[in-house]
Each structure stands twice: as C-alpha cells, then as structure tokens.
Image (cartoon, helix red, strand yellow):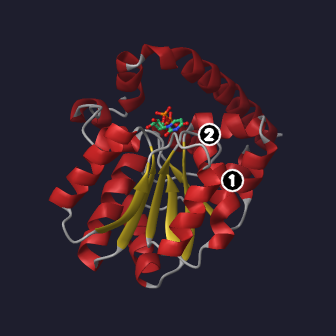
C-alpha cells in the first residue's frame, strides 16, 4: 500500500487547484483519482485498477480523511483532503472563468439534466459540450464521441473502479483534458442528494453522514475500512523493522 502513499498528492487544496488551473490553460492532459480507503482496497483485488492508479500519468488525491490519517501513520503526511465534490465545483468555476468546455458522463438521466441546469445557471460561461448518462450500454463509444468534441474538463461518475478504468483505457484518444472520476458527486451537485451539513464536514464525519443516509453502504464501507486499518498497521510495523 505504501506505493500509493508515495505517489499521492501531498500539498494543500489551494496549490492543487492552482496546478489544475495551469493545466487547463496550458491544455495539458491530467487524470485525477479521488481516493478513499475503498479505492486502495479495491485495487488489492483488481490488477488493472492497481496499474491505472500507479501509472505515471495518474494523479491520486485524498478524497477523504481516512487517506490523510493513513498517510500520517506511515509518515507521508498529506496536508489535507481534496474532496471530489469540491474539486468538481472548482472545475465548473474555472470553466466559467476561462470559458472552457466540459463533458459530463455518468449518473442517471434525471440527475444529469438537473446538473446541467445547475451549471448553466451558476456558471453561465462554462460550456457544456456534451453529456451522457452512465447507464448506456457502450461506454467506450461515449469516449469516442467525447474525443471528437475535444473537451477541457471531463467528469466521469460511474462509481469505482469503472469510472477510473474507462478513463484510463480511453486516455490515449485525447490530446488534452482534465479527467476526474467523481463517484457520487453528480448526485450531490445536482441537488438530488444532500451533502453532509458543515458540522459533519468540519469534524471530518462526511462518511458517517453518508452511511446514515444510505445504510446499505455500511457492509461495503466497514469491510473495506477494517481491511484498510489492518493493512496500514502491517505497513507501519514493516517500516519500523
Ligand atoms: N452509476 C452510473 N452507471 C452505473 C453505475 C453507477 O452512472 O452503471 C453512477 C450512479 O448513478 C452514481 C455514481 O455512479 O451517480 C456513483 O455511484 P456511487 O455513489 O455508488 O459511487 P462512489 O462515490 O461510492 O464510488
């Protein structure tokens, strides 16, 4: 697991946002994975996903507090979280300011149409060059159409690891673009699901709020997080010896 912590982005949220803005302006290509413990645990059993995470082309950021705490345990010291929802909102803001193109791929059709309205209202100079719901059969084909549109920002909400694998496997079709797998962010940014209130966020308990609202996530969450804690402890002990 140390290999993830070695390569993960460790600086502040603000510095990361500045880096992204520079990359949009310079038309660089960037693939961002917003990681939580589940991301690393999924990669344990999925070699393609693991390879995608560890590829030099991939930038990993700490979506949740579990990754920041884990980094402190292993002395990698990530400064703070960069939640995928905040990153998505920042990208809308930059597209608005710089009049750049966004492609949205994923979530249910009604969520997506609501999100398009939110962006058009709140970020009127951002250009939505295309969008597609996440339940179409041929997802690679969506990337082919997307590549023809040459977007500056591509947000993909298909859940992990599908969103990352689709981005990674289609990346060579694009000359530029900031690609991010954003999980459930469309549901929140469209207003369909409520984000955790500020008090939960300030106490780093956003994950707890999500479990309260969606108890069916509990089994997956606890199984991955317990495995993660054991892995961290094993890594810590190995580092000591
Ligand atoms: N999703 C999708 N197509 C699928 C499966 C999921 O578009 O085949 C969407 C789903 O509607 C949701 C998003 O993927 O908007 C992320 O789902 P989830 O909250 O489970 O992801 P997580 O953030 O836990 O990875």
SS assignment at label 1 = helix
Q: Position of residue 18 (x, y in %)?
A: 38, 72
| Residue nearest the observer in this picture, 85 or 143 | 143
Q: Quadrant of the C terminus?
A: top right
Is residue 126 or residue 235 the one in the foreground? 126
Residue furthest toward the right? 241
In the image, residue 185 sits, relative to residue 152, either above or below, namely above
What residue is drawn where x is 37% and y is 47%?
Answer: 85
Residue 39, label in figure: 2
Above or below: residue 186 compared with residue 28: above
Residue 137 placement: quadrant: top right
Between disc 1 and disc 2, whose residue precedes?
2
Residue plotted at (40% across, 62% down): 130
Q: Residues within 10 Å of mark 1 (few under 14, many from 20)?
A: many
Residue highlighted by disc 1: 53
Residue 82 x %, y %:
42, 52
Whole-number angstrom distance, CA of label 1 to CA of label 2: 9 Å
Does residue 33 appear in the picture of this structure?
yes
- Where residue 230 appears, x then y in whole percent? 70, 25
The residue nearer to you, when weighing 118 against 140, is 140
Name which quarter of the figure residue 60 lies in.
Answer: bottom right
- In the rendered image, residue 183, in percent from the top left (x then y), is placed at 48, 42
Q: Residue at x 70, y 59 (%)?
A: 169
Question: Alpha-carbon neighbours of circle 2 within 10 Å: few (<14), some, or many (≥20)?
Answer: some
Considering the image in quadrants, where does the N terminus appear? top right
């Amino acid at each position: 697991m140390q290999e993830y912590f070695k390569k993960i982005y460790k600086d502040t949220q603000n510095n990361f946002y500045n880096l992204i803005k520079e990359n949009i302006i310079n038309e660089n290509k960037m693939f961002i994975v917003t990681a939580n413990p589940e991301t690393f645990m999924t990669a344990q059993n999925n070699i393609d996903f693991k390879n995608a995470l560890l590829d030099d082309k991939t930038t990993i950021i700490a979506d949740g507090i579990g990754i920041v705490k884990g980094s402190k345990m292993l002395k990698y010291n990530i400064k703070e979280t960069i939640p995928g929802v905040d990153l998505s909102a920042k990208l809308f803001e930059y597209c608005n300011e710089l009049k750049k193109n966004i492609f949205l791929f994923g979530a249910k059709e009604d969520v997506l149409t609501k999100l398009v309205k939110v962006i058009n209202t709140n970020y009127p100079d951002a250009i939505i060059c295309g969008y597609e719901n996440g339940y179409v059969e041929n997802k690679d084909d969506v990337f082919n159409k997307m590549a023809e549109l040459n977007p500056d920002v591509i947000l993909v909400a298909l859940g992990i690891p599908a969103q990352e694998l689709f981005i990674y496997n289609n990346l060579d079709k694009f000359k530029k673009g900031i690609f991010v797998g954003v999980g459930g962010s469309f549901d929140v940014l469209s207003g369909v699901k409520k984000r955790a209130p500020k008090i939960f966020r300030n106490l780093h308990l956003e994950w707890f709020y999500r479990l309260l609202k969606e108890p069916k996530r509990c089994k997956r969450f606890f199984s991955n997080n317990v495995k993660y804690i054991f892995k961290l402890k094993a890594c810590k002990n190995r580092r000591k010896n």
